[in-house]
């Protein structure tokens, strides 16, 4: 990629030099023809290299998206195997009284994953599912009250995805009182009359909660959202974003 950019710069300089020569110098016909050919060739090669670089970049993005999807599938497969092994263990040990709770837990998880997958934004869906099952630094607990389809409610999917990812990063890298303890971040979503509500409820203790609140407020202001702090208790850091919807 670095060599390609160097060649593009050289082509650009050659094209600029040829343009200056053709416009400001008194050249003979032969030199004008050579300068014109060099100008056309430089522009053509530069454009070709630029297109190749763009194609390579897009392929890299697609490959990364596929890899993220595969990671989610692998993690989910592993988690479902654990659930089935637990269910099978209860059956083998004849602990039939444990089966209803186990089956109910599986049903709730299936319903939750179904609601996440129906959000309508592939990037957001992959991100939530991936960090929900493999968020080692700070696992996510995602709660969606009803089926929410972002395109139907008129929410900006790209902006909302960036907002949620950035907010998770704020909590993830914020200093904690007990740095060795991994506490989950609960994300709740619901559609209300004044827009889409997104609650971020951190289940641990933040060392500097005021800094977190300031960063979240700045993000909300930049994206035209409203931020409310629902609790200021030491062990309950809950913030609500209200996202305007057009539908």
Image: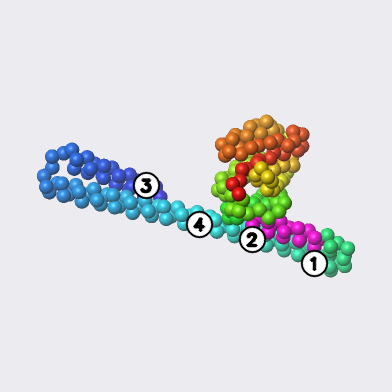
Q: Dot 3 corresponds to which residue?
A: 5
Residue 70 colored in magenta in the image:
no
Q: Position of residue 111 (x, y in %)?
A: 72, 59
Q: Dot 1 corresponds to which residue?
A: 88
Nearer-N-terminus badge (4/3): 3
Q: Position of residue 64 (x, y in %)?
A: 53, 55
Residue 113 colored in magenta in the image:
yes
Label 1 and label 3: CA atoms lie apart by 58 Å
- Label 3 element class: helix
Closer-to-camera residue (246/188): 246
Nearer-N-terminus badge (2/1): 2
Q: Position of residue 120 (x, y in %)?
A: 60, 55
Magenta stretch bounds: 102-119
- Label 2 element class: helix
Nearer-N-terminus badge (2/3): 3
Nearer-N-terminus badge (1/3): 3
Q: Dot 4 corresponds to which residue?
A: 62
Label 4 and label 2: CA atoms lie apart by 18 Å
Which-is-in-front pick, marks 4 and 1?
A: 4
Q: Could you classify mark 2 by the number of other residues whose Cα lies within 10 Å: few (under 14), some (14-19), or many (20 or more)? A: few
Nearer-N-terminus badge (4/2): 4
Q: Residue at x 58, y 38 (%)?
A: 224
Q: Is residue 59 left or right of residue 137?
A: left
Q: Could you classify mark 1 by the number of other residues whose Cα lies within 10 Å: few (under 14), some (14-19), or many (20 or more)? A: few
Which-is-in-front pick, marks 4 and 3?
A: 4
Q: Dot 2 corresponds to which residue?
A: 74
Are dots 4 and 2 in contact, CB under 8 Å? Answer: no
Closer-to-camera residue (143/62): 143
- Vertical comparison of 220 with 39: above or below: above
- Vertical comparison of 88 with 220: above or below: below
Label 4 and label 3: CA atoms lie apart by 22 Å
């Amino acid at each position: 990629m670095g060599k390609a950019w160097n060649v593009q710069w050289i082509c650009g300089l050659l094209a600029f030099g040829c343009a200056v020569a053709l416009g400001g110098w008194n050249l003979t016909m032969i030199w004008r023809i050579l300068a014109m050919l060099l100008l056309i060739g430089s522009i053509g090669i530069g454009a070709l290299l630029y297109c190749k670089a763009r194609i390579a970049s897009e392929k890299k993005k697609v490959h990364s998206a596929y890899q993220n999807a595969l990671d989610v599938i692998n993690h989910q497969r592993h988690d479902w195997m654990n659930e089935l092994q637990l269910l099978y263990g209860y059956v083998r040990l004849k602990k039939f009284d444990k089966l209803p709770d186990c089956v109910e837990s599986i049903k709730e998880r299936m319903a939750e994953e179904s609601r996440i997958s129906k959000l309508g934004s592939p990037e957001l869906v992959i991100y939530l599912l991936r960090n929900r099952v493999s968020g080692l630094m700070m696992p996510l607990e995602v709660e969606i009250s009803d089926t929410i389809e972002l395109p139907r409610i008129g929410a900006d999917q790209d902006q909302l995805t960036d907002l949620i990812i950035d907010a998770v990063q704020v909590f993830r890298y914020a200093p904690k009182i007990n740095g060795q303890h991994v506490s989950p971040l609960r994300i709740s979503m619901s559609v209300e009359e004044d827009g889409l509500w997104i609650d971020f409820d951190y289940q641990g203790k933040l060392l500097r909660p005021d800094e977190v609140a300031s960063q979240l407020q700045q993000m909300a202001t930049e994206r035209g959202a409203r931020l409310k702090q629902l609790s200021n208790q030491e062990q309950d850091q809950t913030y609500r974003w209200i996202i305007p919807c057009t539908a």
